[in-house]
Image: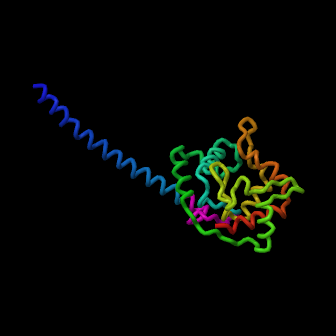
Amino acid sequence: MKLINLRRVLLAAIPIIVICTADRAECAASSQQALHAKIEYCNTCHGLSAQGYRGFYPIPRLAGQQTQYIENQLRAFIERRRKNSYMYNVAHVLSPEMQTALAKYFNALNSKPLRDAPRTLVDKGKTIYEEGDPNSNVPACMACHGGEAKGQQEIPRLAGQLPDYIFNKLVNWNKERGQDERRPDISAIMLPTSHNLSKAQIQAVAAYVSQLQ
């Protein structure tokens, strides 16, 4: 009698297992569709291969960017620590899971850089990037961003980035980054350097890193 009842219980559970499995598959498919839709939305501004785009103003390359850096910046937009009204509107509706999925997707891309910076500035930029400028109290960029400018973890990749985007960010660093004194973040590290670099030096460094693959 007990064996018969156990068999009935197991048979009754089979449809539930099938339904749960189907729901998981449907949920996974739905998640992939949502991710694909978000990627297409991002590409409308950041370029079809996330290589960056020049619209009304330069929009950054995301291809190959560090996963942790992308996630950190999305949170910074949401928490208003980084000032950008457009990106706040985009980021604040993303779930943490979607933020991670997008960051991993863009990190895996390896689009070719646009390479449209003045070649005449590259050598000067390379010197500053690798050696810094002791006279201006500017450390070598490669000390944090790496020899190939690919960054690490929360330190951003600079290789292949649009030079005018880099220029705009550095000259406006204190106006856009670290905007919540109650919640200081890693952006504070760049404040002295962005202040000490001349505009000519920024242009040179931007030209150099922009042509790296």
Q: Quadrant of the C terminus?
A: bottom right
**Magenta-tinted stretch:** 41-56
Q: Which one is nearer the viewer's eye here, 43 or 153?
A: 153
Q: How many marks?
A: 0
Q: Which one is nearer the viewer's eye here, 136 or 39?
A: 136
| 28 on left or right of 86 | left
Instruction: Find residue 54 and report its horizontal and vertical position in percent.
Output: 67, 66
Name the residue at 66% across, 54% down.
156
Instruction: Find residue 58 and report its horizontal and vertical position in percent.
Output: 70, 63
Name the residue at 62% across, 48% down.
74
In this view, the residue farthest toward the right is 135
In this view, the residue farthest toward the top is 1
Instruction: Answer whether residue 5 is magenta in the image.
Output: no
| 90 on left or right of 203 | left
In this view, the residue farthest toward the bottom is 119
Q: Quadrant of the N terminus?
A: top left
Instruction: Find residue 190 and report its horizontal and vertical position in percent.
Output: 77, 49
Instruction: Find residue 157 and report its horizontal and vertical position in percent.
Output: 66, 57
In this view, the residue farthest toward the left is 1
Name the residue at 31% across, 42% down.
20
* Picture colour scheme: rainbow
Name the residue at 73% across, 60% down.
166
Quick check: 75 above or below 144?
above
